[in-house]
Amino acid sequence: MFLIDPVYFLFAVPGLILAMIAQGMVKSAYHQAQQRQSRRGITGEETARAILRAAGIDDVGVEPSHGFLSDHYHPLQKKLRLSPTNFNETHLGAVGIAAHEVGHALQHRYGYAPMYLRSFLVPVCSAGTVVSEIALIGGLFLGGTLGKTLLLVAIFAFAALTLFTLVTLPVEFNASRRAIRVLEEQQLVDPDEMPVVRKVLRAAALTYVAAAINAILMLLYVIMRYNSRD
């Protein structure tokens, strides 16, 4: 049973530690950015609307969401949602994250292929999350052909999850690059403010790196268990 399998922890713990470190870095960088108010005095909402307007995008709505750092862009609904502090406040964290989310809207507008691939994989990922756990537990509990078949199913499910996390990396990195470029081009942030914005975006990117590493490790664990069966 993988819940008490020492080998499982050898694969799971490093990913968990990386995720905790990444989350800690995000909170630290964001907290520091909250202490720096934008010299332009613009909120996250105003930042997003300014960038969208400059890009000629008039069909994307900007609205508040709920929860801490719940910021996201929904390509099907064409909605850019910012968490309350980023929507209403004028600190550099709000400006940087709003610009990052607009980066996704720009990807959508200009047909950035990895973003479309990630959107296509979202339902696959959702199904894979459920199937992978059920198949893994069943495969480890059951012996014989059925157990090995379930482990094979788990391998495909974890592979789909891994693919999703890997595709997410260029999407997020590209959105951050677009955000930094547009903030500089439109002079929404002064040069001496950019290091604070970059630090927030780099820390956020690390959470996606940690997720990808964790997915790879879990895939390797399931493959190892599959190969260990007679």
Image (spheres, rainbow, N blue to C red):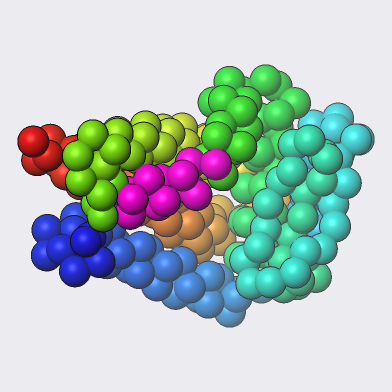
- Image position, residue 212 (x, y; %): 36, 45
Q: Nearer the viewer, residue 200 or 11?
A: 11
In-image side of 77 versus 131 (left or right): right
Query: Which residue lies at the image location 33% right of the left edge and 50% below the top edge?
Result: 138
Left or right of 8: which side holds 202? right
Residue 74 percent coordinates (x, y): 74, 43
Q: Who is closer to the viewer here, 64 or 122? A: 122
User: Where 13 sits versus 215, above or below?
Assistant: below
Residue at the extreme right of the image, as rendered: 58
* Magenta segment: 127-138
* 128 in magenta: yes
Q: Using residue 79 as the reference point, say whether residue 3 is left or right of it.
A: left
Q: Position of residue 184 (x, y in %)?
A: 62, 44
Which secondary structure class fits the magenta region best?
Answer: helix
Image quarter (top left, top right, bottom left or bottom right) of the C terminus: top left
The spot of residue 38 in percent (x, y) is 68, 67
